[in-house]
Image (cartoon, coloured by chain):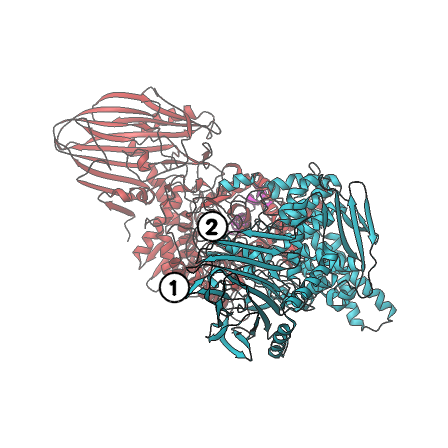
Chain colours: A cyan, B red
Amino acid sequence: MINWSIEENGFNKERATGLGNKFLTGNGYMGIRGTLEEYKKEQLPAINLSGIYDQAGEGWREPLNAPNGLFTRLVVEGEEYILPEKECVSHNMSLDYRHGIFRRLTRFCTAKGDIVLETERFASMKEKHLICLKVKVTPFFEGDFEIITGIDSDVWDINGPHYEQLDSFQIQDSIFASGITHECREEVFVGETIDSTFPFQERIEYSQKYVIRHLSVKGKPGKEYCLHKYISVYTSKDMKNYREKAIRLLSAAKEKGFQKLIEEHMKIWEEKWKVSEVFIEGDDEAMEALNYSLYHLHSIAPRHTKSLSIAARGLSGQTYKGAVFWDTEMFMLDFFLFTEPEVAKTLLRYRIDTLSGAKKKAKHYGYEGAFYAWESQEGGFDACSDYNVTDVFTGRPMRTYFKDKQIHISAAVAYGIMRYVEYTGKDDLLKEGGGEVIIECARFYYSLLVKRVNKENYELWDVIGPDEYHERVNNNAYTNRMAKFTFDAAIKILEMEEEFEAEASKIEPDQKRREKKVLLDNFRDGVKHLYIPQPNDENGVIEQFDGYEQLEEATVSEIKSRLLHEKEYWGGAYGVASHTKIIKQADVITMLNLFSNEYDKEILYKNWAYYEPRTEHGSSLSACMYSMVACKCSMADKAYPLFLKSARADLEEGGKQWAGLVYIGGTHPAAAGGAYMTAVEGFGGIYIENGVLKAKPDLPSHWTKLRFQIFYMGELYQVTITKKEVHIEKIKRESNEKSDT
Amino acid sequence: MINWSIEENGFNKERATGLGNKFLTGNGYMGIRGTLEEYKKEQLPAINLSGIYDQAGEGWREPLNAPNGLFTRLVVEGEEYILPEKECVSHNMSLDYRHGIFRRLTRFCTAKGDIVLETERFASMKEKHLICLKVKVTPFFEGDFEIITGIDSDVWDINGPHYEQLDSFQIQDSIFASGITHECREEVFVGETIDSTFPFQERIEYSQKYVIRHLSVKGKPGKEYCLHKYISVYTSKDMKNYREKAIRLLSAAKEKGFQKLIEEHMKIWEEKWKVSEVFIEGDDEAMEALNYSLYHLHSIAPRHTKSLSIAARGLSGQTYKGAVFWDTEMFMLDFFLFTEPEVAKTLLRYRIDTLSGAKKKAKHYGYEGAFYAWESQEGGFDACSDYNVTDVFTGRPMRTYFKDKQIHISAAVAYGIMRYVEYTGKDDLLKEGGGEVIIECARFYYSLLVKRVNKENYELWDVIGPDEYHERVNNNAYTNRMAKFTFDAAIKILEMEEEFEAEASKIEPDQKRREKKVLLDNFRDGVKHLYIPQPNDENGVIEQFDGYEQLEEATVSEIKSRLLHEKEYWGGAYGVASHTKIIKQADVITMLNLFSNEYDKEILYKNWAYYEPRTEHGSSLSACMYSMVACKCSMADKAYPLFLKSARADLEEGGKQWAGLVYIGGTHPAAAGGAYMTAVEGFGGIYIENGVLKAKPDLPSHWTKLRFQIFYMGELYQVTITKKEVHIEKIKRESNEKSDT
């Protein structure tokens, strides 16, 4: 059995920012960094909002952090007892990741005697605009103390400040803080109300940058003073009457009370786990790490809207500009598709709704169809800069090509949509624009195809594959194969439409049908001629791109030893890896994982054995792909450490936290999704054959049982795998239970 | 009237290396740097040999410097009177560039009294393996002095030493030094013999690294002691019996004597000038600079063989690896074609004879046909490194693409051959392999053509044009147009062959004829579809390559102000110029100069006005192209300073001399050739129309007359241009005079 809880004892100033990610809570609408209530912006607290962005001046456009309604400080005799400034007697933090509840308990020593501050908080899974915070103070002395609590609008930003106008005010017994953004003049509107079990004297202090209550309490030794804060968070993008909604939400919450609210919240979490928990017998560490990863995916899943995706760093802050990458479709999607298909649909609908942005981007570069944003923000705007890296030697921005040449992004979108169709068996998404998206992506690739005039092959030149250390390459195996996938998908869709049209007896005008015929011919032509790098006759290795074989042979440690500066970029035109065979992350192996059924196990193995030692795993997207292909080669024990690396990505507080003075830390939901895929599709070996859910498992030697549930074709199945057998059983559900809760 | 002589008074140690280039003498077989006889390798003296190379260890392969048979020092009372070590009373150096004679006169002050050393030397234009040196010593005291003279085998090298084995010995009264190279074990064999007008005591000292005579002389005040040295230079590449030849040459020279030899030498020079002198009335400075430039071209022209080209730095040393660039065909060729067509043929035959190297290079990159070396050495071997530049910030080599992507080199070769055909009217070169070269170059370009599958155009991608600051671009206007030129030329040749075959009534087997038919079809297809960037409808500007327009607008001085290190590279992936419109050298303008008849004068002007301010002129190949196009826009006065810049390139001692510790200085024969083209084709306005030599001149305002002679169709014409008229007159020549002397 596992604890479903992680803990942290003692206070270490250096680790406080990292713990903000590890102890994150959230409900898809917002993410609350696991920072302490007394923190001001210097300590990087954040209530990070999904799907709303602002650009201040020339800085990068990034998502907003809401005014911090959690802000609470303890004062004794005019002195603030707060971390990290004051030393504490003891400090403990915990996260109940079964229920998304954050708790802390800190004991300070004052001149009068000790005092204990205890809090408990959650972003409600039921009311997505509500945060609840319980503050419990226990003085071990007789005498006055003060609780300062309210809303701090002077929030932490990476490229802020984002609020051009700030305001604070009181309505009845609630206090409010409002900020208006620069770019779109959206309002972020945070309210707070309190109740308590004890009497106090209250004074409310207003300023532009905060609104806080000073609660003076006459304390008795050993007595617990318990205060509840109900915090509403809305933006003008959510709905028209968001101010009224906020006022009503606060009074309803206060009326219902903290206890009832936390019970409702926990009940929803339990419902999530009923479907999504992955049970591993014989390996508590793995089970804990994996389910902790799933907790993160649940906490950032958009369930308050029908069209939104997940940023590469989830809701852990403004890092990576809060932008959506291929991470969502290629690494996170399966978890939702398997456990909560409606969320999967919401994620994909974001791509349908940003098709116009993708078409605009394609046009900008002179291509046809849809070229999705490498770093997608509102409306599909590509937030990716032409200069993504700073040269550590000159301090100059370096021209990078992630935005212009990582063309595999459009195929990832098509792949996600087709995967939805495959696992749900439904064509709703295709009809709601998904079909059009795929056709536009195929048009994009068709317009990119080049051929040597004297050769038959069609090729894709001057691209960047998943391995970003090698820029501007020709015929990246992954990219070419994904383009072919897109053509195949578009052909399928056009053929389906053709059938439908035939039945509908020429409702569609001739012109449009002729256009479709041309597209169909083009895509078939694309499939027929597109060059897909094949395994080398001698060693079975698929060349990552034209000329990769000629690059310098080196080891990762050799490359590291060549670094002149610990932070220098390995890629680009002259990076230490650029002219060697060292790659950043799974590339050919990602392709082989997706299309493993097209290759012999021997080829999978040979490529794994070739590329793994040449991979830095410099991206959290790398390990899971190697892990899955290892499973497909019946090497579960080689897969295991890579799986654990993915599953523990956010537990470890690993990954880079700072790039110079810029904070780049955050959670790694793609690694979490990758860990899930490895468990279910790697070790579990889940696959579809002729419309039937099957499993070809390969468990690590110390796992005695693996059990999970997944949705397939609208039905929920329980899969139980032991060393001896695989048992796949359809679960009967009550009629009011729906896959999307 | 001009002096036909340059002079240098006084001695300045810092300028000594630069003067080595400015005072160069040579005869095409070898170049003698204008350094002093007493110099050892630290002062960079060199007798640089044409067409023979060696690679020592991992260093760059470079041409050889022969053992220095000029080596001479003056000793008085055991003390050496040499520069730069000793101070001198006076020092004067001069170069008679009408006759290729170097002279120096230095007066030293010894404890006994002053002593004057005077020398005169030349590389014989008649006997290409012979150097003659006269040494005249005048003591102004009574007493002994010593002349040390012999052969110094411890030569200066950039990437040496190149002699694995050194030897020295005496045969009769001649001394010899021999060196055997590492790579091909070729022998460089230098001999020396002397005669004198005065008695001396002689002692010969041998060592591996030198062989020197110690001549002790009893001096009388004011008396001149005159010694003649005859130096033979051969290599085992020249002929089989080179040792015998050397011995015979030395005794013949000694028998003939210095005076006779210098007269023969001067006579040949006068014959050269008879045809090649360019007379400018009203501007002695320009006339001097231009004819001084022509002197350099004469001094390095290969006349001792039928197949050899000229290195980018002529015979001034090992810089640029002694390699042949496009400089020869595109910048130097016209001078020889117009004044000495046999030399032009020799230059081009080098390309015919290195076709196999070019085919090998093409094959290496997966292309067909002939991809000529960017830096061509023996056999067409490409000496260009993949890493041509060192990053000043990291000290690391930077991957450059001059070798792989500067595909316009093959077109330059084709262009040179066709220009020979056009101006001589002869098909000898075509028949001797030139036709095959052109067809192979066309095959090369055809194999490089790409098309977007959904577009009609054929394009050339991922190239570097003349402007090397912008790497890996698509559709460089110059490159595409030159590829089209190559197709056109190949078509012409194939069509000629077709006619010939028709006459020869099927001598050629069917198979071969069918192959030719395929080539003809391909090249016609190439011409039809190859995309040639056209003038923009609005501003008339031809875009240098796809996307140039989108680059940052900047000025050269702005770019300079961004430099963090004076020696940092402007190009590459992240150079200060790379993402701006600032270009290194004429690119579109080079194209417009070559094909000016295809464009309206207005278009020429608009492009000139657009690109000139955006050009750094960071290459000595740049100014002349702008100058010629300015002439074609009737802007002779704007052309003039650019012309003078080209003509004075070697007079100025300008250009970079050092890159860190590596010597990169040398002469600039392409600039010299560019100055010539500007005078004759720019100001003189010479062109061919329907097989007739014509002129459309535009003289600078202060020039009152321009007169020169040029060969056309085997006839010599004198062209005289004044403000009022153009006079082109056929010159009657005696039957024994030949164009190739």
Q: Quadrant of residue B663?
A: top left
Quick check: is B146 in the magenta stretch? Answer: no
Mark 2 element type: strand
First to last magenta residue range: B412-435
Q: Is residue A281 something that shows in the picture?
A: yes
What subunit carries mark 1? B
Q: Residue A695, position in %: x, y? A: 79, 47
| A577 or B297: nearer the viewer | A577
| B279 or A33: nearer the viewer | A33
Indicate which disc, 1 or 2, sits on the residue closer to the N terminus.
Answer: 1
- B506 is higher (above) or lower (below) than A55: above
Please say if the residues under marks 1 and 2 sit with CB atoms less than 8 Å apart: no
**Looking at the rendered structure, which numbered label has been put on residue B715?**
2
In the image, what residue type sits under mark 2? Glu
**Looking at the rendered structure, which numbered label has been put on residue B638?**
1
The answer to whether residue B594 is left or right of residue B167 is right
Quick check: is B425 in the magenta stretch? Answer: yes
Q: Residue A668, position in %: x, y? A: 60, 54
Q: Main secondary structure of the magenta part?
A: helix
Q: Residue A638, position in %: x, y? A: 67, 39
Both on one chain, marks 1 and 2?
Answer: yes
Distance from disc 1 to disc 2, alpha carbons, whole Å, reads 33 Å
